[in-house]
Image (cartoon, rainbow, N blue to C red):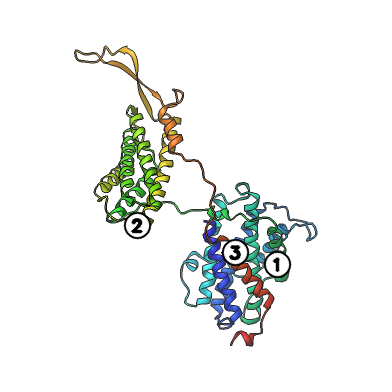
Amino acid sequence: MYGDNTAQLREALGTLMQITRNGSDVDDLPADAVELVGSFRHSITVWCQQAVRASNPNAELGGTTPRTRGPAEELRYRLAAARSAYAAPLPTVDQLATPYPNYLVDLWRQAAKGAALGEHDFAAGLSYGHLTDAQAMTVLKDASEITRALTGLDRRYTDAVPDWEPIDEADLLGRAAVVCAAHAGYSEPDYAVDRSGWRPPVRLADGPTLPGLGGVLQAENNLLVRLSYPPDAYSLRLILDSQRIVSHHAANLAPAGSGHRDVAAMWAERAETYSLLVDQTRNLRGLVGHGVAAAQGALAASRIRGIDPNTPVEARALRHLDALFTHIDRRVAETIAAGADDRSYLMRVGIPRVDLSAGGAVRQQRSRHIPLDVPPGAPVLATAKTRLTPKPDEPRVPVGSARSRASFTKSVETGQRQGPQPRSELSL
């Protein structure tokens, strides 16, 4: 997520500024380490460029001057100029992933790793068209403060580190970052943007079966992964029934208390929802799909049946199970809606006519199969839409977002007030 990656950036750069202020081990870096730090700095500069572009997509910078460019355009222009003058290439994946023995260089690696991971956020919805104005200003201020940190570190490294490649026109870049940070700070920030961006995909939980509720979580996680492929109609009914069983027993596992009473009631309601869906899909037909997801649902149901209701469970495991329930419900609702759209799921309905072709003495009523979306207000579609798809909540602000940014800004401003120190003082 954007918040995790930027927090890693701020934490590593904040520690680096504190080290340089205290003057420890800055001028003892070997030449290969200095070159590696330059590569890491290059990666952080790329992230700042992309953050400014995501918050302000104006790309027409050719022929402009500092007088005609706005704060964001000026910062973007100076970042591009600084990056084009870098001699160090971007770091490789191995350099980003492998810890470096020198603590100072490894802090640069951690910051560059956060920047490299943060680049995925901009392609995963963290763009100007998906951000509110307040969120765009928050991203712009983050990029400005991190740029200020880079220019502050550059001034100290230029005086203290041999063979250090200074940022081209660092004063102009630092001034543009200060102006842009002040411009973005005029409006009220929206730290809910920290929950946007790229998230790692859910993967299968392989390995031996975990004991207790852990085994149920393992099977539910695998069910969520397997639901990425549409099941056939019979397997879908098995999945619905397995979730009814898991929800019913999970409600009994939640310990009595004010913090878990609401969760138990919510899971009991979920069991009623899936019981209703099982009843509404008793005539569902369709051969398109597979049944591997149903096997994981059956495992989850059998495992939770074997857990004693008096077994103590951790609150963290209950939160994890509740999160899996939310994702599975959304995936099941999407599966039912998609089966209705492409007509891979059919509903068997009776027609007022006797089936004369049927064998036996008693003639049965004839039936036919119709797509789910043919009858208006089909009960299974209405239930899936209203009870399995909750209303989107307002994005919550992660705890510590404001405090982390305030601490980082204070560290940057403290370093700029102190100014560069002579090499003799840094080597003490």
Residue 39, compared with residue 164, is above or below; it is: above
Residue 137, compared with residue 345, is above or below; it is: below
* Residue 156 image-quadrant placement: bottom right
Give the numbered dot on residue 405. 3
* Residue 296 image-quadrant placement: top left
Q: In the rendered image, is residue 39 in sight?
A: no
Q: Residue at x 70, y 52 (%)?
A: 58
Q: Amino acid at mark 1?
A: Leu
Give the numbered dot on residue 263. none
Q: Within 10 Å of the Cα at label 1, are there few (<14), some (14-19), or many (20+) other Cα atoms?
A: many
Q: In the rendered image, is residue 169 in sight?
A: yes
Q: Amino acid at mark 2?
A: Glu
Rounded to the nearest angstrom, the CA distance separating label 1 from label 3 is 21 Å
Earlier residue among tags 1 and 3:
1
Q: Residue at x 58, y 61 (%)?
A: 402
Q: Secondary structure at mark 2?
A: loop
Q: Is residue 420 left or right of residue 101?
A: right
Residue of label 2: 314
Give the quadrant of the C terminus. bottom right
Give the numbered dot on residue 173. 1
